[in-house]
Image (tube, grey):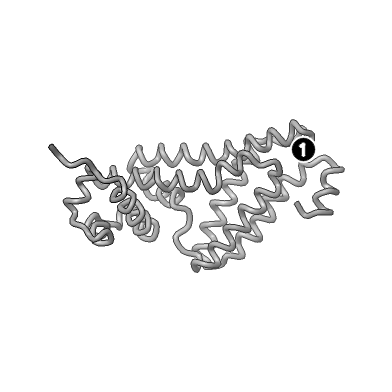
């Protein structure tokens, strides 16, 4: 009887594979490199994953869950969408300042690299970005219902715009090696929301900066 895969080893493989694929991309990362990073043979990898594609998809799931816990869930539950969007961009600026503006968004990288050549990767990336936008859309709908925003606010289109600005800022920050891009673009993302506040709410935002 075959020995069942060890979950701890599987987690280690996912961590090492994510690190390599994040920096080099899926196609430019070999199974030999991943096995070497894990101090195991390629045959050991196949004990846990049947193919490089299966491993790549598992890494994508692994990374999406990390993003979901750190970003998506808090965003969907926030009571202050403007503050949450401001924090989203400021946190990204701090992170990119610390890593030299490298790597970027793992899901975004995979989406760009694999969407036109592998439908399984494309569908996973699509579902992640749909979830991302829907989370902010949910928070915006809740804030609009509470009377914070005017009826002119279109939660779905605004949430998609904020997502597009965030991913676009990540691309610019990487290519320019300039984390300040997040500060400038984040300011515009916040303005998308502020211009749809009720007048008395606008004064509150100006007063307390949230």
Q: Quadrant of the N terminus?
A: top left
Residue 80 in which image quadrant:
top right
- In this orientation, which residue lies closer to the viewer: 133 or 152? 133
Q: Residue at x 29, y 57 (%)?
A: 29
Q: Residue at x 68, y 37 (%)?
A: 140
Q: At numbered mark 1, what does the secondary structure look like: helix, strand or loop?
A: loop
- In this orientation, which residue lies closer to the viewer: 10 or 53? 10
Measuring from the top left, give residue 44's x and y in whole percent: 19, 51
Measuring from the top left, give residue 204's x and y in whole percent: 83, 48
Q: Residue at x 83, y 43 (%)?
A: 201
Residue 122 in which image quadrant:
top left
Q: Is residue 173 above or below residue 81?
A: below
On screen, residue 57 versus residue 87, left or right, reads: left
Q: Residue at x 55, y 47 (%)?
A: 71
On screen, residue 69 versus residue 88, left or right, reads: left
Measuring from the top left, give residue 186's x and y in whole percent: 65, 55
Number of labels in the image equals 1
Q: Is residue 201 above or below residue 177?
A: above
Q: Is residue 173 above or below residue 44?
A: below
Measuring from the top left, give residue 17's x and y in whole percent: 32, 54
Mark 1, residue position: 149
**Is disc 1 surrounded by few (<14), some (14 to 19) or many (20+) residues within 10 Å?**
many
On screen, residue 26 versus residue 175, left or right, reads: left
């Amino acid at each position: 009887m075959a020995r069942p895969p060890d979950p701890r080893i599987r987690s280690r493989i996912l961590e090492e594979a994510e690190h390599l694929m994040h920096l080099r991309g899926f196609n430019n990362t070999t199974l030999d490199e991943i096995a070497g990073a894990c101090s195991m043979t390629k045959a050991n990898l196949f004990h846990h994953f049947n193919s490089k594609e299966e491993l790549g998809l598992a890494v994508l799931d692994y990374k999406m869950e990390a993003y979901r816990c750190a970003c998506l869930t808090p965003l969907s539950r926030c009571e202050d969408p403007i503050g949450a969007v401001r924090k989203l961009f400021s946190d990204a600026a701090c992170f990119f300042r610390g890593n030299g503006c490298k790597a970027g968004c793992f899901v975004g990288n995979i989406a760009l690299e694999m969407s036109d050549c592998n439908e399984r990767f494309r569908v996973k990336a699509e579902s992640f970005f749909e979830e991302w936008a829907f989370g902010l859309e949910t928070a915006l709908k809740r804030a609009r219902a509470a009377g914070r925003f005017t009826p002119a606010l279109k939660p779905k289109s605004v949430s998609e715009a904020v997502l597009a600005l965030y991913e676009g800022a990540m691309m610019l920050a990487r290519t320019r090696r300039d984390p300040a891009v997040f500060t400038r673009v984040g300011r515009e993302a916040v303005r998308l929301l502020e211009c749809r506040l009720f007048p008395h709410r606008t004064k509150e935002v100006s007063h307390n900066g949230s």
